[in-house]
Amino acid sequence: MPSILSQREIDALLSALPVEEAAPGASSDIAKVGKPVKTYDFRHPEKFSRDQLRTLEFLHENFARRLQTALSAYLRTVVQINMLGLEQGVYDEYTRQVPNPAVLYTISMDPLPGRAILELHPSIVFIIVDRLLGGLGKGLNKSRELTDVEQTLLETVVWEVLSSLKEAWTNVAALQPRLGDIASTPQFLQVALSTDTVLTISFEIRILDSAGTMRLCIPEVVFEPIMDQVTAQAWFASSRKAQLPEQAQNLRKNLDRVKVPMIGQLGEALVSLQELVDLKVGDVIPLERRAKEELEILVAGKPKFLARPGMMGRHLALKISSVVPEEDEDAGDEEGI
């Protein structure tokens, strides 16, 4: 027959267990055993891990740097863009924080599902419009909705935003963002349900002595297909793979702009200073080269090609016949030394 513990034995066993002190305000008769209990708000579910939030923060800091460079060149003035923060919440909370009026654009995040919202504060919008119209970049004392002409001008800047966003997302997804509708209140741009989780990324834009905010509101559904790639390890691995081709492309683009002098050398002659002074019209200087012999083409002072002289239309020309071997180039450099 199994033995039954007495009340004294039960109390002795319970007193041997590790017991943490109750938090201030908690009921004194409830003992917390093991790890402390964390509260979970089902109205504010956390869909992104800390690692994913940190990766998205790196990604959009890169976006801010690219956009800063693009807008500085486009507006022909100094533009500073700093990322203020990244926060996950529900769509209803975001809509309640949007100022009225505001400038809101929908962005299709192709090939990812769903749409995002680009929010520009009126304080910075009218500064941008004033710069585009040739002004000094002064805003308005009172906010109002944009006119049709102002909307058309602002769209050119929004396309710069989308271009920078596309480049920043390259390591995560081959994004092809498209500009959608424009509105002044979020109620006309229903991109998610009121209880859906969204990610809000805030930026500060400084133009001259004025500043304003820009925010991106991206629903969680947009990230669902690429959740596995939104990690620090995957992001840095893909960025290293994309770094070399991008660097090579930028290097080639910069080298294409470099101009080097190219000279066709007909021949050489060694004359004294007196002979040079006594030269007259009609005098002949032998160049120690035969008429049918190939000429050297010097690139930045070094022999690179051999060519034959001729005509191309009415212009003198050189037809390259061969490339000077590297050994001959080095020999020419040593002779010059």
Image: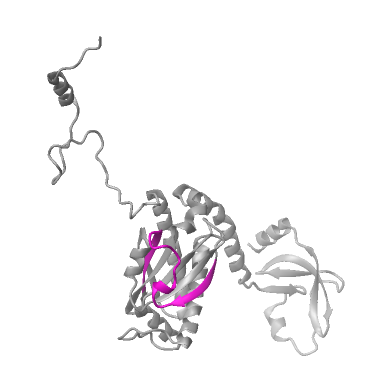
Magenta region, residue range: 177-205
Q: Nearer the viewer, residue 117 or 287?
A: 117
Q: Residue at x 33, y 55 (%)?
A: 43
Q: Residue furthest right?
A: 292
What colour scheme governs how the chains and residues are painted in the rendered image of this protein? Answer: one colour
- Reply above or below: 23 against 131: above
Across and down, in percent, residue 86 comes to: 36, 60
Residue at 44 percent across and 87 percent down: it is 147
Quadrant where the N terminus lies? top left
Q: Residue furthest bottom?
A: 281
Q: Is residue 201 magenta?
A: yes
Depicted 223 relative to depicted 298: above or below: above
Give the camera-side residue of 207 and 332: 207
**Closer to us: 106 or 242:** 106
Q: Where in the figure is residue 184, as x and y percent of width and height?
A: 40, 78
Q: Residue furthest top?
A: 1
Pinpoint residue 29: horizontal percent, then vertical percent: 13, 37
**Left or right relative to 244: residue 95:** left
**Residue at position x 36%, y 68% in the image:** 95
Horizontal side, residue 137 vs residue 297: left or right:
left
Is residue 264 highlighted in magenta? Answer: no
Quadrant location of the C terminus? bottom right
What residue is shown at x 36% (from left), y 60% (from top)? Answer: 90
Give the number of marks.
0
26 left or right of 55? Answer: left
Identity of the residue furthest to the front in this view: 1
Determine if residue 299 is in view: yes
For residue 295, above or below residue 137: above
When the figure is inspected, residue 92 is found, relative to residue 9, above or below; the finding is below
